[in-house]
Image (cartoon, rainbow, N blue to C red):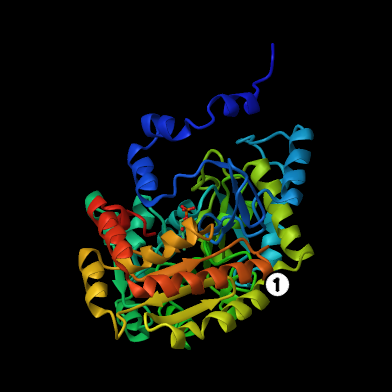
Amino acid sequence: MADLDLRALLDSHAGGSFDLHAKTVNPQFVRLLRTIGFDRSWARAEGAYFFDDRGERYLDMLGAFGMYNVGRNNPTVRRALEQALELDLPGRVQLGITALPSILAERLLAVAPPSVQKVLFTSSGTESVEAAIKLGRAATGRTRVVTADHAFHGLTLGSLSATAAGEFAGRFQPLVPGFTRVPWGDLDAIETELRSGDVALVMLEPIQGKGLNLPPAGYLEGVQAACRRHGTLFCVDEVQTGFGRTGKLFALEHWGLEPDLIPVAKSLSGGYVPSGALLLSDRVFDKVFDSLENALAHGSTFAPTDLAMAAGLATLHELAERDLVAHTARLGELLLERTRPLIDRFEVVKDVRGQGLLWAIEFGEPESGKRSWNLVEKAQKGLFSQLVVGPLFQKHRIMTQVAGHNLNVIKVLPPLVFSEADLDWFVGALEATLEDAQKLGRSAVSFALKLATAGAAASLRR
Ligand SMILES: Cc1ncc(COP(=O)(O)O)c(C=O)c1O
């Protein structure tokens, strides 16, 4: 019997993948990619680059929403996976344990704040958030969960109830009861909610991904103190900000936070295999897993797999060996230094902000050219950003994204192996693109209106 020949299979489908995808997976997504001109055939990837089927190199400033911190197809992680396969490891025993999960758990806890002492493995970010909600409720005997406006915590029902995204949630009602959202940055609003004594947990991203909102000074520390006073658990969602993204291994280190619950995922496995975890305090763990009867009170079939554990160990190793966290802090500062002057240079640029290699640029109505701006923005709020994202991709081969519905914000989160030369590539392309986009010429306006009519712009925001 011959083995499956993956190369031959791919070659036999060359050029036809869009039609097959439309037929068998998601025709609307294929339509969307064709409308915005992102319908490239991707051949391979390496570090911070993609290569299309013509061998053209593209700079990946999206990092698959933060999944590839150690770079696409990282060779260290790949070798660890190869070793794991060659070892014929037992895999999931279910009624038994294997060594790798506790070894990775020990390493994670060694670099996490001292407030967490246990690791519950999952297979994704949303599962880690769901675990935080479930365990938080059981541990406190309370039902309510407080989150912030503009939050993004995932798209399964519990996480969606915590996510402040009407556009994601609207058609999926009713959501899980007991969720309250308060304005981001408003400590008094959190205090008010906590006073009722029925809030199980407050869950916040340390830096909000949607729109990229940095916390006001003292906010996160204040929330943590308020939670302690009211017997409420504090959950810091590090799914996107974890593993070096912000120039610290975990973003919570910027404020010295010590939460009870820390969901992580995305880059934990170097992007090769689905993996996530909830880091939690013994206090929470012991309340939920409190007897033999409850020894398996929460979990899922796949988590943790040996491959995910091997990849996780290799990812932590790689982050440390290559000093990627310090590299990220340095390049993040350089990126801000090089792009902050754009605020003075371009009327349309209202703000540039970021932490590490989580960076965003915000646009607003310019003094001159108001008519065209209004035409574009009336068709679809936040549409101007597409006039930057589109040319960055088409002309400069750089992939970026709009940072949320109805927002004129572009966000980038490249693999942390991003170099100074890549930074030059990005900044140069951004300057050239802004020169053109700010003019809001006839062809730009008609392209924007075409996107709005097709409904494409609205669906591109995440
Ligand atoms: C802060 C945050 N939490 C949770 C999630 C959900 O993670 P996943 O897409 O792996 O379910 C995301 C995904 O973008 C996220 O950014």
> Can residue 255 be seen in this snapshot?
no
Mark 1 near ligand 1 (CB under 8 Å)?
Answer: no
Q: Secondary structure at mark 1?
A: helix
Q: Nearer the viewer, residue 111 or 375?
A: 375
Q: Nearer the viewer, residue 419 or 424?
A: 424
**The quarter of the displayed image where residue 415 is located:** bottom right
State the residue at coordinates (43%, 54%): 130
70 up-or-down from 4: above or below: below
Q: Residues within 10 Å of mark 1 (few under 14, many from 20)?
A: some
Q: Say whether residue 277 is left or right of residue 192.
A: right
The three-letter code of the residue at mark 1 reads: His
Q: Residue 138's spot in the image, x, y percent?
A: 42, 58
Quadrant of the drawing holding the C terminus: bottom left
| Residue corresponding to mark 1 | 327
Q: Say whether residue 449 is left or right of residue 342.
A: left
Quadrant of the drawing holding the N terminus: top right
Q: Residue 145's spot in the image, x, y percent?
A: 35, 66
State the residue at coordinates (52%, 41%): 41
163 up-or-down from 20: above or below: below
